[in-house]
């Protein structure tokens, strides 16, 4: 069929296979994007649950922990700011602050044997601790998906599809708080007594 | 051994399992073709391959049945009860299961408690949409929360990796091989006179003879081979569930220490029947089954040696996970 035939054949192949490839890659990006949105919803559900639980916990420990008024107020304030947060980075930062005030409250509660003996407080603490874990695992799941989505947009040749259809990389839910990132410093140098 | 991280290990395990399954199906087909060729058809006749089809149909049917409502039967046989959420430990277990479901991005399975003091756990159900996890009382009493999380993550991985479905299919295929071998042995006994169809194609020659000998040996060894392959697949899936469980918790060391505690409780778990051994976190027959030394018992057990699993998890724990991990 000669050179001309060969070129024609290649051209037809390109015209037919090109769009099929583009559709396939585009759909892949769309499905990843929806998975990311779903992953974010999972985090959101757990955060809402945490916001709902905190007032109950405060109400039930208030009587015993009246000398920790300051900490209690900080938890409430952090909860209210976190509930009003928008966007991934903003939410991540404010929720981290809430996590820290909460863990301080948990640590202080250790000093109150009456609280530890109280069954309903214990149940609430377990609920909150578990919700905390769920936030963590939902974050892990979301971050894995978000990374996959972002990578899919960057790799060649899919990046052409991503650019043409204006896909945007999504933010990871990161822990920015210094306290959670800091590597504990261990001093192993031997000092004279 | 080349060190592997978590994700490599998952991939390698998946590849091996596929290889095993393909081998199994080929073996079954080989038995069937041989039976059709030598017993009923006479070499190379275009007749219907009754034996091959029959064996595959039997395997398929029994697999379908056990997938359809095998899970309830398994739970009943282990006396599994629904959780009592008023008990704080059971509530904690329920929470841990939900946490792991979130980590894996699957619906939360139903959770059951088995009133048995020996620590063990298993998962059942055809897939993530309809799964159940059952845990013995011993797990609640002996493990701390992190270790419990490791165990549940292991079971959740069996669910997520479709291990229950895979193992059911493997068991059904093994059953089909057994039936096949039984069938043909009987056929050889009674219908021996028809065997060498010399009249038509006496010139099949050496190649045919070799094939016949090979097939005969296979038929005799089939029950043993089927069992070995089923057990090998089961052990692979245990390693895979350990690895992907660690991916969920990002804490392989907790599962390692849970396994050590489970190992320390040497008694068998009488509530869990042998039929679901391959879905448990540790062999319910106790130390004698899983931990016995020697090649043969190693080949015939559903679980890899616990010490080896712990060693692998420890190594994972000291190795950094892939950079995209949160």
Image: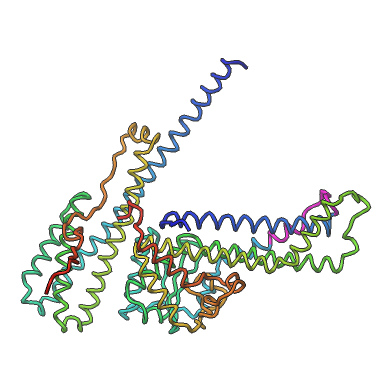
Q: Quadrant of residue B104?
A: bottom left
What residue is drawn where x is 38% and y is 77%? B83
Looking at the picture, tell me which residue is in the foreground, B231 or B264. Answer: B264
User: Is any atom of residue B81 visible in this view?
Assistant: no
**Which x, y percent locates residue B79?**
49, 81
Q: Quadrant of the C terminus of chain B?
A: bottom left
**Which x, y percent locates residue B4?**
43, 56
**Which x, y percent locates residue B193?**
91, 63
Looking at the picture, tell me which residue is in the foreground, A112 or A34. Answer: A112
**Which x, y percent locates residue B2?**
46, 56
What residue is drawn where x is 50% and y is 82%? B268
What residue is drawn where x is 51% and y is 78%? B284
Looking at the picture, tell me which residue is in the foreground, A188 or B33. Answer: A188
Which range of residues does the magenta coloring cover?
Answer: B42-57
Q: Is residue B52 above or below residue A165?
A: below
Q: Is residue B46 magenta?
A: yes
Q: Is residue A111 magenta?
A: no
Q: Is residue A144 above or below residue B162?
A: above
**B305 with respect to B41 (left or right):** left
């Amino acid at each position: 069929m000669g050179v001309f035939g060969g070129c024609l054949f290649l051209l037809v192949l390109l015209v037919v296979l090109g769009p099929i490839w583009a559709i396939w890659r585009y759909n892949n990006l769309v499905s990843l994007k929806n998975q990311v949105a779903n992953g974010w919803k999972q985090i959101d559900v757990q955060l809402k649950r945490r916001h709902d639980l905190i007032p109950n916990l405060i109400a039930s420990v208030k009587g015993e922990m009246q000398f920790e008024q300051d900490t209690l107020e900080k938890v409430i304030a952090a909860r209210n700011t976190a509930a009003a947060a928008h966007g991934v980075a903003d939410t991540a930062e404010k929720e981290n602050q809430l996590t820290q005030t909460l863990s301080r409250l948990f640590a202080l509660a250790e000093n109150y044997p009456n609280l530890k003996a109280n069954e309903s407080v214990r149940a609430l603490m377990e609920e909150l601790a578990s919700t905390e874990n769920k936030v963590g695992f939902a974050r892990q799941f979301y971050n894995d998906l978000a990374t996959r989505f972002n990578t899919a947009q960057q790799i060649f040749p899919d990046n052409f599809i991503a650019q043409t259809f204006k896909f945007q990389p999504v933010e990871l839910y990161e822990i920015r708080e210094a306290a959670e990132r800091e590597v504990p410093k261990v001093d192993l140098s031997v000092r004279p007594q | 051994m080349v060190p592997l991280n978590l994700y490599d290990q998952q991939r390698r395990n998946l590849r091996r399992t596929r290889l095993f399954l393909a081998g199994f199906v080929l073996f079954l087909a080989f038995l069937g073709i041989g039976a059709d060729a030598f017993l009923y058809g006479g070499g190379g006749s275009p007749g219907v391959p009754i034996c091959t089809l029959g064996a595959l149909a039997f395997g398929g049917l029994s697999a379908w049945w056990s997938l359809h409502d095998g899970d309830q039967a398994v739970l009943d046989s282990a006396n599994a009860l629904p959780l009592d959420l008023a008990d704080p430990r059971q509530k904690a277990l329920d929470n841990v299961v939900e946490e792991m479901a979130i980590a894996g991005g699957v619906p939360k399975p139903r959770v059951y408690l088995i009133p048995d003091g020996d620590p063990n756990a298993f998962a059942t159900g055809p897939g993530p949409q309809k799964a159940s996890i059952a845990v013995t009382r011993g797990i609640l009493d002996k493990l701390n929360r992190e270790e419990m999380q490791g165990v549940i993550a292991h079971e959740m991985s069996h669910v997520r990796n479709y291990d229950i479905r895979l193992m059911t299919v493997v068991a059904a295929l093994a059953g089909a091989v057994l039936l096949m071998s039984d069938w043909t042995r009987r056929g050889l006994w009674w219908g021996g006179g028809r065997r060498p169809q010399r009249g038509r194609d006496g010139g099949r020659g050496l190649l045919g003879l070799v094939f016949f000998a090979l097939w005969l040996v296979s038929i005799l060894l089939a029950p043993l081979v089927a069992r070995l392959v089923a057990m090998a697949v089961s052990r692979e899936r245990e390693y895979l569930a350990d690895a992907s469980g660690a991916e969920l918790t990002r804490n392989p060391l907790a599962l390692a220490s849970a396994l050590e505690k489970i190992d320390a409780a040497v008694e068998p778990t009488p509530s869990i029947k042998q039929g679901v051994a391959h879905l448990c976190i540790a062999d319910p027959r106790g130390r004698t089954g899983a931990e016995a030394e020697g090649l043969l018992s190693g080949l015939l057990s559903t679980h890899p040696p616990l010490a080896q699993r712990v060693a692998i998890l420890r190594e994972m724990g000291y190795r950094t996970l892939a950079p995209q991990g949160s």
